[in-house]
Image: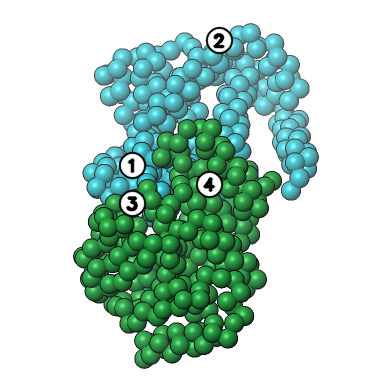
Chain colours: A cyan, B green
Amino acid sequence: MNYDFRVKAYFMAFFILILIWFVASSLFTSPALPSPQIVLKSFIYSIPDILPHLAVSAYRVLYSIIIALATAIPLGLISYRDRIDSIISPFIYLLYPIPHIVLLPLIILLLGIGDASRIFLISMILFFQILVTARDAARNVSDYYILSLRSLGAGEWDVYRHVIFPASLPKILTAMRISIGTAIAVLFFAESFATNQGLGYFILDSWSRADYNSLYSGIITMALLGFSLYLVVEILERKFCRWV
Amino acid sequence: MIEARRISKVYPDGTQALKDVSFKVNKGEICSVIGPSGCGKSTLLLIFSGLLDAEGEILINGKRVNKPQRDVALILQDYGLFPWKTVRDNIAVGMKIQNFPADEIEKTTKTLIKKIGLEGFEKSYPKQLSGGMRQRVAFARALALKPSIMLMDEPFSSLDALSRERLQDFLIQIWQETSSTIVLVTHSIEEAVLLGKKIVVLTERPGTVKRIIENRKAGRSEYRYEEEFFEKCREVRETVERVIE
């Protein structure tokens, strides 16, 4: 598939979605479903209002992603050793199936109502998603590659650097891609209480004021935030996983 | 020089792969190891390379081996290349691990890529190469560390006949240039005879040494066309077949 065609296909999909929206809005004629051009106009007008909220939300979600990656990837990768896996695995299997989002009240009791609680909640949820994938990926690396590297005199660190990490990277990036959807969803939830900053707050506030134009602007901004994170992962994949 | 003294290997699941294997490979000699599949040939190479523990003793240049040696290169079946590394990085990885200075890595890699005729493929990944090219990259990676001993596990088994002959000649050339000691595991009788001055025939599992056949004329490309080559092949074939019965 050539690159030009793919770019065209993306634009095509975008316009079809806008068209469906347009048709739906003219059918429903409800203030809760304004037409795309009205939303676009109000979105452009509300950019100055939204930017500070976007900045706060981006900070919260990026921070959470970084914390989750920095803890989950190393822990998942060292699980390639049976000894370590036999210690870590039971924890994963006991803790992963719990719906972590219900721990919110406890987190607030312990960490207060500031950003720490929100970041902790998001990163905890991502942590498990990435940990489970990184662990499975590391455990599936064939001994063949490890033997091949060891025959060159590799130590433990070399095995991680040259085999376990690069071999697991495509799966980790896939997990990141899935996690971004989760991260944005949890971000919305985490910004729905005890704050007056962030896109989640902006959306809920517009909703309660029945200001549908702002509501849509908030939704679009949140979608764009998710979309740009998604693009970052896509770029990382292109750069580091060309071999797949 | 490599010496195996009464090597036995029982895997944790109870299968005995090797039993009392003893033989000696002189310095600068190519030794072929041949036997039915599952006779522990690959296991033997892993033991030689110090990656696998076993009963008995392996002596390399008179010293006991129990961990990978800098001086010993191992080429695994299906080349052992890393799919996530480019040709250049695959060749350089051994030197990187051994902390060679960057400019030396650069220089050696360049020379080797030229030697194996893969200029222009430095940034290609293994999956973009043909089997023969991958095999040459695997050779280059092994040669980068200037080993005095090379262990090869069925290096040409997945190549077509033509590439196979070309790479056998390439191996002979490498051997003549570096005068390294080579142990080559193969299931091809012709290959064992063409390359091995000494041919070790193993029995079915658990592998034991059935016979060691001397093959003085080996290690030359022209040998393929000589009368003695065919006779040797017949001799080896008879021995191997007796092994299977």
Q: Residues within 10 Å of mark 4 (few under 14, many from 20)?
A: many
Kindly identify which residue carries mark 1: A156
- Against A64, residue B44 (above or below) is below
Where residue A171 appears, as percent x and y from the top left, is: 48, 44
Q: Residues within 10 Å of mark 3 (few under 14, many from 20)?
A: many
Please indicate, yes or no, whether residue A146 appears anywhere in the rendered image. Answer: no
Q: Is residue B216 left or right of residue B53?
A: right
Asked if badges 3 and 4 are on one and the same chain, I answer yes
Kindly identify which residue carries mark 3: B68
Residue B91 is labelled as 4
Q: Earlier in the sequence, mark 1 or mark 2?
A: 2
Q: Mark 3 is on which residue type?
A: Pro
Disc 3 to disc 4, how far (Cα)?
18 Å
Q: Mark 2 is on which residue type?
A: Pro
Asked if badges 3 and 1 are on one and the same chain, I answer no
Q: Extreme top residue here? A: A48
